[in-house]
Amino acid sequence: MSKIIGAVEIGTSSAKALVGEVGESGSLSIVGMATRQNEGMRKGEIMDFRKAATAVHAALEEAEKMSGTTVDSIYLAQTGAHLKGQMLRGSASVVSSDNRVTADDLKRASMEAKRRQPDERRSYVHHVRTPIILDKKVVDDPVGMLGNNIDLGYWSIDGDDKAIQMGLHVISNYSLEVDDLILSSIASATMVAGPDLRRAGTIVLDLGAGVTDFVVYRQGYVAYSGVIPVGGDHITGDLSMGLRVLEPYAEKLKLEYGQAMPLKDEQSEDVWIIGNKTIGDRSVPRKAIADIIHVRVTELFEIISKELGPLLDENELKGGILLTGGGSRLQGIETVASQVLGQNVRKAPFPPGITPELAQPENATVLGLLHYGLEDHSLPGQKKVDQDVGLLGKIGRIVGIGPANE
């Protein structure tokens, strides 16, 4: 019997809902998707609950209608500057008399790693496991191997309780449960950076409307992640101020004529703000548009460069840097990123098999939510169903149903 699952991204400019059907063999088919303008967000965080909920619920309703089904549960994307990551590590001695590693040894090391609690009024939303080390040697599955000590870690992201709770309530008000919270950058990377790229070492930058999410992979595992509170809306704001036009017209100019690289003087044709050349319309130099965008985009990548610091090591980034998200549509943005970051930067392609209407950079997160959520992230020797204590166990403290036990 198939299962119907959903994915929701509550973005700064729009809310996206995706409906997937999981067959008995584990195959995933996208059967519905919808997007609604969202006016309840700012920089990745809900500022107006009613407006955000209205957008999400409308997107869910349309996606369900398109699919002809109803969703059983939701994977919910997490973003916002309130999210912070840290590396947690734990170890355990192999206790069997013959020194063979068991699943219980791994579980004890995992519990030790997760023992550290976040600050008051904050909760973990995502634990992403790093390599397992058996006696100082990285192994994929040590169960049954001979050894003395197991060491493993998690890149663990915690967030503000109120911000997390707000997103959960948006979904619960639609009478749905959240299966899991998944970091937006990791969801996007799951979609656009395959296993080979992650093993080679890569960085995925998701350029959204309100924020830029990023994640760093080394040897196939997450090494670092973060959220920069700068996105496409800031470019629109700069154009509005610099050109002295209303923001809707600035957004239109950005989408139609925007590019990240500056233009030469001889390329400076004039374009019309409204486009109908009637009374009230006026022209602006296309070069001015490009110059304003170039300054803001350069600043964004300078912030990212400062944040990543030594992680921008070309020897550890054989897979290069991938750009996705709606902001990556800007012409020439990969060139500016390469100049500032000093790395090979390119726009991220989608894997084959995704229809062209879905394979758009602004859909990377919501598509990746389903794929990441359906993967088995359990420890070796531990069944997925045994590990899945569910969201109630992970962050139950937030919604007032008992202490978190993950």
Image (cartoon, rainbow, N blue to C red):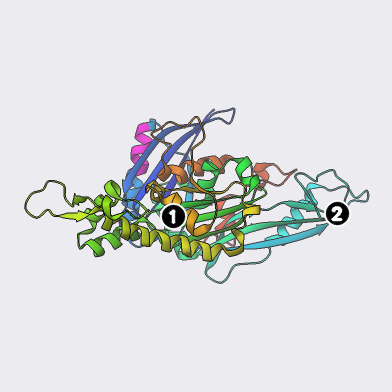
Provide the secondary structure element on which disc 1 rests. helix
The answer to whether any part of residue 334 appears in the image is yes
Q: CA distance from mark 2 to mark 1?
A: 51 Å
Residue picked out by circle 1: 336
Residue picked out by circle 2: 94
The answer to whether any part of residue 44 appears in the image is no
Q: Which residues are magenta?
A: 59-66
Do tag 2 and tag 1 residues touch (Cβ < 8 Å)?
A: no
Residue in view at x 59 percent, y 46 percent: 319
User: Percent position (x, y) of residue 19?
Assistant: 44, 37
Of 237 and 372, nearer the camera is 237
Left or right of 251 on screen, residue 386:
right
Provide the secondary structure element on which disc 2 rests. loop
Magenta-colored stretch includes residue 266: no
Q: Residues within 10 Å of mark 1 (few under 14, many from 20)?
A: some
Q: Quadrant of residue 41?
A: bottom left
- Tell me the kind of residue under disc 1: Val
User: Percent position (x, y) of residue 282?
Assistant: 13, 54
- Tell me the kind of residue under disc 2: Val
Left or right of 385 on screen, residue 123:
left
The quarter in which the N terminus is drawn is top right
User: Percent position (x, y) of residue 289?
Assistant: 28, 56
